[in-house]
Each structure stands twice: as C-alpha cells, then as structure tokens.
Amino acid sequence: MRKFKQQFLAGPYLIWIIGFILLPLIMILYYAFTNGDGSFTLSYITAIADETNRKAMGLSLRLGIICTIVCLVLSYPLAMILNNMKIKNQGLVVFIFMLPMWMNFMLRILAWKLLLSKNGVINSILTGFGLSRINIINTPTAVVLGMVYDFLPFMLLPIYNSMTRIRKDWIEAARDLGAGNVTIFLKIILPLTVSGIISGIVMVFVPSLTSFAISQVLGGGHVLLIGNVIEQDFMQGMQWNAGSGLSFVLMIFVIASMTIVNIFDKEGEGTSIC
C-alpha cells in the first residue's frame, strides 16, 4: 500500500517528464533525421557544415569560450574573497550576488542595451567628462558582456561551494610546515576546487553556446550565433527539420560536456548548493 502511494505521488512528475522532456526530445530526433516526406535523411545533420551554419557555430564556440574564461577569471578570486571573509553569515553575501538572477532575463538584457547604446548611460557619462564615446553595441563584445553578466553566478557558485569544503586546519597545518601562499594555493586549494571549476565551466559554456536572445538584443541582428540560426529555422522559416538537425548537433556538445562533469565531479561536489 505504501509503495502504491509513493508511485501515485510520483505520477505528476512522470507526466511532466514525459510531456515536457521526453516527447520534445523524440520530436527533435524525428525531425532531425527525416525530411518533409518523412523519409530518413542525414542532410539536416550535415547542414552544420554549410558556410553560414559553420560560421555561426564557430562564432558561438569562440564567444562561448571567451565568456567562460572571463567568468572563470572573475569568479575564482571572488570566491576566494567570499570564503575568506570573516563574517558569520557568508550565505547572505552569496545571496546578494545571486539576487540579480531573480529579475526577468530579458529585462536584464534590455538594461544592458540601454547602458551600451550610443546615447546610453555609459556614453552620456563619458561625454559628460569630455571623453569620446564607445561604440560596442551590436558587436560581439556587447554580446560577451551580456553573457558574462548573466552567467557569472553559474561559475561563482560551484567554485565557492568547493572552497567552503576545504578545512581551515589543512591550511593551518601547511603554514606550520613552512608552506607559503603560492604553495598552499597550488598544492591544496587549486586541486580541491577542480570539481567546482569543471562544473562552473560547463554550466557557463553550455548556455553561452546555445544562447540566442542575448545576441539578438545586444547584437542587433549583426551577431549571428548558431542559436539564432536555429531560432530562425523554427520561428521564421518554419523549417522544423533544419532546426532540429542543428539542435541535435548542439545536443552532442551538451552530452559531451555532461560527460566531462561526471568524470571530474563524480560526487557532485561542484554542483551542489550549500
């Protein structure tokens, strides 16, 4: 009877998983490997090699890697600072950094558009001080800035969680044995935070690779990422087969990224939340 109740309570979750995860994936796979007549084909998978798709994919990879590197460079020192802060409630400080994520995604992107536009806040301040304007809106630089702003918490949180698991007495013991700050960092802190680094890299790289809204708003249609190509296939051209084929290629990158996480973070330490 108890087992039946547990299965009954799990019913809504199973319906959700089947209806909103499994069925869409099955539809994507079906359209990716068939043409308009329902016949099997690989042409939509190999379409990633077309010049437009290849350039969009290459730009997506390049901007995704740049975004990931910038987030890592900013997040690691910040995580160390937060972990070393001598306050009782460190979780409150982390909460403050996570607070902007509670705001609507598109509102945050539109706010950056207002900041970076030619007559925006930043250029108004620069001209007020007699400096020249900066024209980075509708460029890859603006897209990377938007990505870093949105995805930085996804890098910060797993690294910070990994650092909080490093016992203070290990650091103190190393200092008693004559180890300096550089040695402690290279021999203790860095190795013990590898799982958080790998998790953060994947959690930033995957959404930045598949992003299309940020490049659409901050790129102004001049920065074409693979996500924009897929969005255009589905929403504008109604080419479900072409969009599904490119989506399947991106799924391969996501699965490969998840495999890397499982190899380096078998216990899930980097992705758990304190």
Image (tube, rainbow, N blue to C red):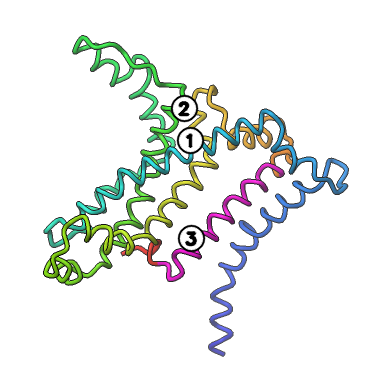
Viewer-proximal residue among 172 and 266: 172
User: At label 2, which amino acid type do we have?
Assistant: Pro
Q: Which residue is mark 2?
A: 140
N-terminal of the pair, mark 2 or mark 3, is: 2
Q: Residues within 10 Å of mark 3 (few under 14, many from 20)?
A: many
Q: Which residue is mark 3?
A: 261
Q: Is residue 208 rendered to the left or right of residue 136? A: right
Tell me what residue is drawn at x 85 percent, y 49 percent: 40
User: At label 3, which amino acid type do we have?
Assistant: Val
Residue 79 part of the magenta-drawn span: no
Vertical side of 113 occupied by 249: above or below: below
Q: Is residue 250 rendered to the left or right of residue 135? A: right
Magenta span: 245-268
**Secondary structure beneath label 1:** helix
Q: Which residue is mark 1?
A: 63
Furthest toward the front, the residue is 178
Marks 2 and 1 close (CB-CB < 8 Å): yes
Residue 176: x and y, percent? 11, 69
**Secondary structure beneath label 2:** helix
Q: Which mark is residue 250?
A: none
Q: Is residue 158 rendered to the left or right of residue 171? A: right
Tell me what residue is drawn at x 64 percent, y 37 percent: 230
Residue 113: x and y, percent? 39, 25
**Secondary structure beneath label 3:** helix
The residues bearing labels 1 and 3 have C-alpha atoms spaced at a distance of: 21 Å
The residues bearing labels 2 and 1 have C-alpha atoms spaced at a distance of: 8 Å
Tell me what residue is drawn at x 34 percent, y 14 percent: 119
Which quadrant of the view contains residue 11?
bottom right
